[in-house]
Image (tube, helix red, strand yellow):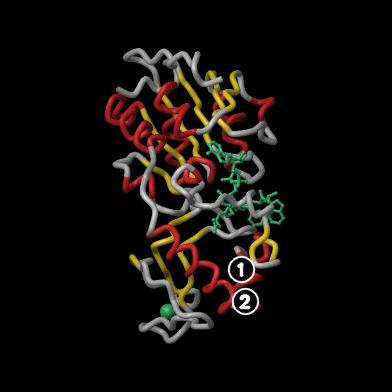
Amino acid sequence: MTSEIEPIALDERTFVLALTGAGVSAESGVPTFRDSNGLWEQHRFEDVASPEGFRADPALVWRFYSQRRAGAAKVAPNPGHVALAELEARLGERFLLATQNVDGLHRRAGSERLVEMHGQLFTSRCADCDRAPFPDARAYPDGHVPPCDECGGRLRPHIVWFGEMLDPKDLQRINDFLERARGNKLVFLAAGTSGQVYPAAGLVSVARMYGAQSFLVNADPAENTAAFDHFIQGRSGVVLPKLLGSR
Ligand code: BV8
Ligand code: ZN
């Protein structure tokens, strides 16, 4: 029950590393990866969100991401996003949010100390030249593969696909934060994630090596629930404001 949720004790030396997944955006109406059982239009999610999938059928991949851009443009941040942005405002340098979500809702809720580990839905880059990624909210008409106006190659969403490395700078930011937290009280808070996708799902183990007290807020038990000290079952939009003592 969410009625007796005790806010996490956050004193002036507490550092908080948060990790969010699709379940936090589900509260805004964004379908989760798992709701579709890892399937989209009878394609395995891993096949569409992968370099192999893009090579085989870039138009199919652009249809998938264009639909998600259109969907994500229509939704707004929810109280779970706001509670995390408020916690950042309170803790400042002692807070970092790593998200697996690509929908931009954390940034729209005011989060700035944010690592978008799996990329950004509303950013494109070129698959064939090294031009810098650029903001791109366009949902392309079905079957269209947008060309790069610098090299004529194919644009792609600036997303980390299955089988692709995460940006080492992102992983370094998380490690630097954990190093800075050494000697202080550290809380690791995961919310709305099934704990199936690595390396994000392994962050709880890394945080525990730094002595973190770990919390999981999730609608149902996750793959890695056992790795957490505390599991609070419930909707992130209801639990996070209570757990983080939002005003
Ligand atoms: C990597 C972008 C190193 C796409 C995503 C074989 C070959 C190659 C790699 C692998 C392999 N086997 C395993 C791997 C590693 C692989 C992996 O972990 N695979 C899994 C499937 C086993 N990882 C990778 O490939 C990563 N890269 O390892 O590189 C490397 C490189 C080369 C060679 C060797 C090694 C890259 C991972 C990133 C993939 N990209 N996103 C896109 O989004 O379009 S991941 C994708 O899945 C999304 O980001 C999404 O966030 C994520 C799913 O995770 P969740 O966020 O947890 O979402 P999910 O739906 O699963 O769960 C939602 C949860 O919320 C549920 O538990 C539900 O109960 C809960 N919930 C629902 N509603 C609510 C709620 N909770 C609270 N309130 C609610 N209202
Ligand atoms: Zn190009």
User: For numbered disc 1, what is the local secondary structure?
Assistant: helix
Relative to 42, is 54 on the left or the right?
left
Ligand 1 neighbours mark 1 (CB distance < 8 Å): no
- Between residues 73 and 54, which one lies in front from this camera angle? 73
Q: Nearer the viewer, residue 173 or 19?
A: 19
Amino acid marked by disc 2 = Arg
Quadrant of the rendered image containing residue 40: bottom right
Q: Residue at x 61, y 68 (%)?
A: 51
Percent from the top left, x then y, of residue 166?
53, 52
Residue 232 or 85: which is nearer the viewer?
Answer: 232
Q: Who's the residue at 44% across and 28% down the image?
A: 240
Residues tagged 2 and 1 counted as in contact (Cβ below 8 A): yes
Residue at 32 percent of width and 48 percent of height? 108
| Neighbourhood count class around disc 2 (C-alpha, 10 Å): few under 14, some 14–19, many 20 upward | few
Which of the labelled discs sits on residue 55, or is there none? Answer: 2
Say above or below: 76 vs 232. Answer: below
The residue tagged 1 is 51
